[in-house]
Amino acid sequence: MILFDTGYLVIGLIAFVGSLAVQGWLRSTYGTWSKRPNTAGLTGQQVARAILRENGLNDVQVVATPGDLTDHYDPRKRVVALSQHNYSQASVAAVAVAAHEVGHALQHAKGYAPLRWRSAVLPVAQIGSQWGPMLAIFGIMLGFGGLLDVGIVLFGAAVVFQLVTLPVEFDASNRALAQMRNLGVVTSTDESGSRAVLNAAALTYVAAAATSIMYLLYFIMQSRR
């Protein structure tokens, strides 16, 4: 049975340890720079609004949202939502995260292709991430090759979504740093801290994609037995 399959258990262990390590690094990096005031003395909300205004995106709202590191951009509502700390604090980490989320708004406004691709595959990816692994596992356990193949296809869509997410996130970070430089709101020290925070956050997406790829390859190898 799959519960006792060595390969599956090894992947799960690697994913668990890797996730803990990446999340620990993110929390540590973010924690360090969230205590360091930025030189400009601006909050995340102020920097977000300044970048939006500079790029003529006055119709995009900036709001506070509950939670810790819950920052995101909603393209349907055209809202940059910042966690309470990043919204109101004038730290290096706060402005870096805020500028990153505005980077997604800039991508949306300019029709950035990978962002459009990610949106297109999202509906199938949501189904695939939920049902794909389950169908694949039952297919292996019950010896139903057809069920396993369906699971592989569905989960494959989720993996594609994660892979397309990588350039979207890295590009948003690059846009964020460029915009902050253009506005003159970062010094060399601030930029170093901002880059560290954004790189740590990006690594969480890399780790998630790597784990999903390992599981997908495992399912594919099982289907060829």
Image: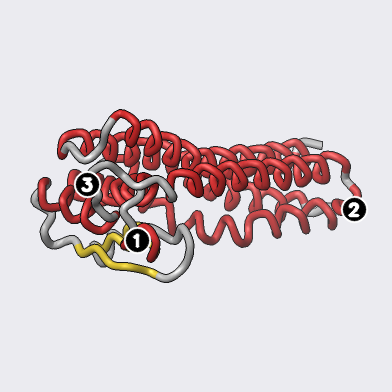
Q: Secondary structure at mark 3?
A: helix
Asked if the residue at tag 2 contacts the one at tag 3, i.e. Cβ–Cβ closer than 8 Å, the answer is no
Q: Earlier in the sequence, mark 1 or mark 3?
A: 1
Q: Amino acid at mark 2?
A: Met
Locate residue 115, reporting x and y percent. 33, 46
- Tell me if residue 115 can be seen: yes
Residue 106 disc label? 3
Q: Secondary structure at mark 1?
A: strand
Please name the residue that numbered disc 1 is placed on. 82
Give above or below for 188 relative to 51. Answer: above
User: How would you rate the neighbour count of disc 3 (Cα within 10 Å): few for under 14, some for 14-19, many for 20 or more?
Assistant: many
Q: Quadrant of the C terminus?
A: top right
Horizontal side, residue 29 vs residue 221: left or right: left
User: How would you rate the neighbour count of disc 1 (Cα within 10 Å): few for under 14, some for 14-19, many for 20 or more?
Assistant: many
Residue 1 disc label? 2
Horizontal side, residue 51 vs residue 3: left or right: left
User: How would you rate the neighbour count of disc 2 (Cα within 10 Å): few for under 14, some for 14-19, many for 20 or more?
Assistant: few
Q: Secondary structure at mark 2?
A: loop
- Residue 218 or 185: which is nearer the viewer? 185
Marks 1 and 3 sit apart, C-alpha to C-alpha, by: 16 Å
Q: Amino acid at mark 1?
A: Leu
- Residue 95 or 1: which is nearer the viewer? 95
Give the residue furthest to the bottom.
66
Q: Earlier in the sequence, mark 3 or mark 2?
A: 2
Q: Amino acid at mark 3?
A: Leu
Locate residue 89, reporting x and y percent. 34, 58
